[in-house]
Amino acid sequence: MTYGISFYAVAWGTAGKAKVALFKGGLILLAACVVVGQLVYRIWVPTTPIFEVMGAFSLLGLLANSVCLYLL
């Protein structure tokens, strides 16, 4: 999503690019908060990772990166 917004904002002026950068920064901050929340939760409630979920997310990441490289 952030790559798409960045590509779309290339033609915008400085103010538009600044708004997009602020929005992307907020998304990154939100993701960091989720990761910290997961970390704290996993410390208190340890579980065995589910490999199917991990594999699905890795394939999703591979697909997203492949699409972005294709578009570049």
Image (tube, rainbow, N blue to C red):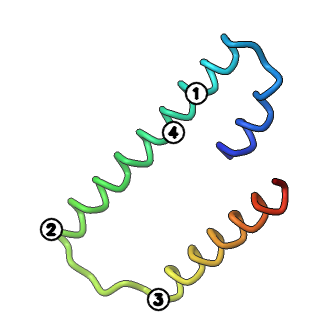
Residue in the picture at 68% in, 13% down: 14
User: Mark 3 = which residue?
Assistant: 51
Q: Which of marks 2 and 1 is nearer the N terminus?
A: 1
Q: Residue furthest left?
A: 44
Q: Which of marks 4 and 1 is nearer the N terminus?
A: 1
Instruction: Answer above or below: position of 10 versus 7.
Output: above
Amino acid type, residue under disc 2 in the picture:
Trp
Nearest-to-viewer mark from 3 and 2: 3
Amino acid type, residue under disc 3 in the picture:
Phe
Nearest-to-viewer mark from 4 and 1: 1
User: Mark 4 = which residue?
Assistant: 27
Residue in the picture at 37% in, 48% down: 32
Pointer 1: residues within 10 angstroms few (<14), some, or many (20+)? some
Q: Residue 44 carries which label?
A: 2
Quarter residue 6 falls in: top right
Pointer 2: residues within 10 angstroms few (<14), some, or many (20+)? few
Q: Do the residues labelled 4 and 3 touch (CB within 8 Å)?
A: no
Percent coordinates x, y for residue 37 in the rendering: 29, 54
